[in-house]
Image (cartoon, helix red, strand yellow):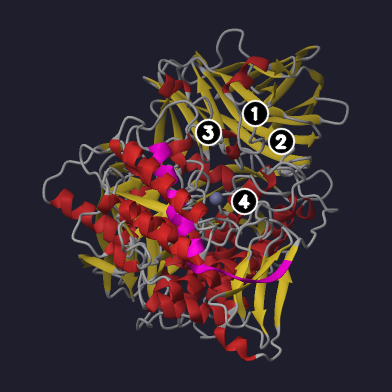
Amino acid sequence: MRHKERLEFHWDANNEGLIWSEDGHPLQGLTGGGERIEWIIPDEWRDGKEHLFYIEMACNGMFGNGNGDTIAPPATDRYFTLTKAQITAVNLQARALFYDFWIIGDAAREFPSDSWESHQANMVANAIMDKFIAGNGSQESIIEARKIARQYLGDKVDSAGVYDTDTTPIVYGIGHCHIDTCWLWPWAETKRKVARSWSNQCDLMDRYPEHRFTCSQAQQFKWLKEYYPSVFDRVKRWVKKGKFQPIGGSWVEHDTNLPSGESLVRQFLYGQRFFESHFGERCSTFWLPDTFGYSTQIPQISRLAGMNRFFTQKLSWNNINNFPHTTFQWVALDGSQVMCHMAPSETYTASAHFGDVKRSVSQHKSMDQDNTSLLVFGKGDGGGGPTFEHLEKLRRCRGLSDKIGSLPRVKMGESVDDFFARLEKKAAEGTQFTTWYGELYFELHRGTYTTQANNKRNNRKSEFLLRDLEYLATLASLSDTKGTYKYPKKNIDDMWEGVLLCQFHDCLPGSSIEMCYDDSDELYAKIFETGQKAREEALEVLGLAGGDAEGRLVAINTLPWHREEIVQIPDSLTTGNCPKYIMASGETGIIQCQDVSSEHITPVRVSEIEPGVFTMENGKLKVKIHNGAITSLYDIEADREVIVKDGKAGQLVIFDDKPLYWQAWDVEVFHLDSRKELPPFKTFITHVGPHRGSVVVETMIGEKSWVKTTISLSAAVGSQQSYVEMESEVEWHETMKFLKVEFPVDITNTEASYETQYGIIRRPTHYNTSWDMAKFEVCCHKWADLSEYGYGVSILNDSKYGFATCGNLMRLSLLRAPKAPDAHADMGRHTIRYAILPHIGPLDHRTVRAGYNFNAPLVLQQAPTSALDCDDVFKSISLSGSPSLVLDVIKRGEDDQDVSRGELPVRHGKSVILRVYESLGGKSRGCISSTLPVKKVCKCNILEDDEDEVSIVRNEQGGGVRAEIELRAFEVATFRLQL
Ligand SMILES: [Zn+2]
């Protein structure tokens, strides 16, 4: 056997595996179940001596461990049986003939039956069979049969030389392995999948010179570096040769519906910095084949991260309308555009079949502009990426195209960037690609705005915590005169990397197994712990920590605007009959508290006017609660009723939620037909004023499920619009039900507005067309709004993302109860806050700010008596001007001398990064002011590369500078203040 031309070790236990060398290096992955079961035995081992290698076996198949069905929760009692363990001597000519015959057979079946190409394929295939049978399968007959195959495939299919002809290809093949960072397996298994899959690809590159493999997700590269350094080094060598091609520029292939604007920025900042520091180059294509929706700001944010190109695929899964383009320009809210391509073969895990190549043309919808396309092939998620079979088939497809024609000519050996560069060149030369404006709404997986509520809540909370921490740590690092405080870059990096990881497209959307959420709960707990500790340390440097008993009650306002709110006094700071609430009022920085007797305040009054009917009034709003719902919300100043006649706001409703298949993912339009109102069980007053009035509504859902909603109105403060706040405590133990809360409002508009990353997206409130109807459930961030001329209503929330507005009925989605792939998704206790904010006039900055305020409640603390002296530091950086401009983030420069962790070259001196966006959709001007010793101000991209210098004016008195800025509608602008 030692003298046979190819010896392979075949191993199949139906599970994934990894072959290790005797000295502990991973060599190649195995998939199991008949897929990738072979490992080529090295030629040096033909020496007759004993050789040792190890096989690590995983307790899962390619798609986790579900019993019977792919998305069934993992079975803990599943066993894997070894069915094959043998050394095989492979007849390489016979194997080659097998692929020759396969492709010719495909041509016979898949070319039109009335075409000469189909007839000839039949004749050639018959001739091959006749020769093989007549020769009794002898080696000679195999060689002869292969000669016949050349009549159809040409004579170059045995090498990469098949691609070296002067004919023009139109389908560009690129190997890929879509590895879900978690899904039907936890992160721990993903780390192993990465090592298995990528070592396979390095091995294939040794054998197939035309092979090119692209893969994304900096997090996976980082894991590989940490846990499998020798594989990482091997990958790095192939990256250098241009064959292993990192792509995407993001930390993970994240969801784009739910993360905040800043989170999307950090996906790219952390991703691109990793790629640049490890491979010397940033990515130029944003790669997101699998995602459950496409934020309208993606083109802007990815351009700001140096990526003008976008590849995706999932949109082809739309369940209502067929998306009409495959190559097009996608335009963001602010007008930025990227070149977008969706592989016409409609998959990012193609098997490189004849049919995939054929569909690259037959399903190409943008042929009028350009006939080229990408063919993204390779098994994902434990399949280990492309196999030698894929590469063999593609060689034959190309040979066939050159010899016979008809099949689109496929090419291997280039990169995704080469593909896009050609499209860009064409666009520059005048080809008008079709343009798509705004959201690429994905007409499927609409349940993912709601599933796994706790995880989504943690995402929102950690985004706000990081915002707070970076701001305070920046101030602390700049004001520390002792030189002992260091900007907590490592803590911040660890926290962001955790948050970004949890935004993976099966994690945050809620489509993973229970184990993944055990992992993410643990990670979030660590993020909160690290963040709170680091925040305390920053406060200490700022002189705001550890209040003394005489210290005044203060709150720290880290939002960039004046706040004036009735705030609860923590139990630890109140005694006996002391008031439980107080008014806090002030600018950014330290906010002082005032007694509620101030003239500025109109107290709230609550009464039960007849049994079960309650009213609350604060001089601005008058609320009537009947049968547990708000039957009237009267805006006294506007002199108008907000709730539609006979409507019930705050009414809890429940729906049957039985999707056709993808339980955690999908909610189908027909669920709306099963609407049931949940009647109240008990309603009573808990707070009677004067600061806050509250009525509690208790509702039973089922035997074990209930909701306790506290409806509150605070005393009215100054000229601010009041809102009705609701806090629902839910004990949830349902099966395939959907809980929502309704707000039927007396407003007329065919469009509603929803907050998205750095802006507003408008969607229909009707089902005129199938495209309108498809948006029966949509994503929002901190608020949704329905406004008409002169008046509107915003619904705020503190942790929710699913919403629907149909006619004048606004509906916030609260909880779902899918049973797959997590059998216990969302079971247990939840606390959800939301509010009705009516407003005179159009949707404007009041709602934008209320959304922030609602998510960042002021927390009272007893500050040291000296605290008020510290307020100046908060005035050191500020933004004034149009209220539509939001100063969203203040942080230190990534590569500042005193901040850098050394990944990329250090930049001398200190700098402060400001992220500002235009939130309402119109060109706006503002002024950045700073009392810091600012040398210059630069507008930069989100990777913090300086672009244009902004002229600054130095204040004559007291030092400090001002810089005038102007942003276009929904623009995200980053400014670097060099100190
Ligand atoms: Zn995926």
The image shows residue 371 at horizontal and vertical percentages of 24, 44
Residue 25 in view of the camera: yes
| Residues rendered magenta in the picture | 85-110
Q: Are marks 2 and 1 in contact (CB under 8 Å)?
A: yes
The image shows residue 814 at horizontal and vertical percentages of 66, 33
How far apart marks 1 and 4 lie (CA) works out to 20 Å
Q: Is mark 4 on a helix, strand or loop?
A: loop
Q: What residue type is labelled 4?
A: Cys
**Residue corresponding to mark 2:** 818
Q: Are marks 2 and 3 in contact (CB under 8 Å)?
A: no
Question: Looking at the rendering, in which quadrant would you find the N terminus?
Answer: bottom right
**Residue corresponding to mark 3:** 444
Identity of the residue furthest to the left in this view: 429
Question: In which quadrant of the rendered view does residue 159 lie?
Answer: bottom left
Placement of 951 over or under 436, stated as above or below: below
Question: In which quadrant of the rendered view does residue 673 lie?
Answer: top right
Q: Which amino acid does label 1 sit on?
A: Pro
- For residue 507, the mark is 4
Is the distance from the Cβ of mark 3 to the nearest ligand 1 atom less than 8 Å?
A: no
Residue 963 lies in the magenta stretch: no
Seen in the image, is 684 located left or right of residue 401?
right
How far apart marks 1 and 3 lie (CA) works out to 11 Å
User: Which residue shows up at 29% across the image and 36% down it?
Assistant: 116
Name the N-terminal-most of marks 1 and 3: 3
How far apart marks 3 and 4 lie (CA) works out to 17 Å
Q: What element carries label 1?
A: loop
- For residue 804, the mark is none
Q: What element carries label 3?
A: loop
User: Looking at this view, is 493 or 842 the one in front?
Assistant: 493
**Residue corresponding to mark 1:** 659
- Indicate which label's residue lies in the foreground, 3 or 4: 3
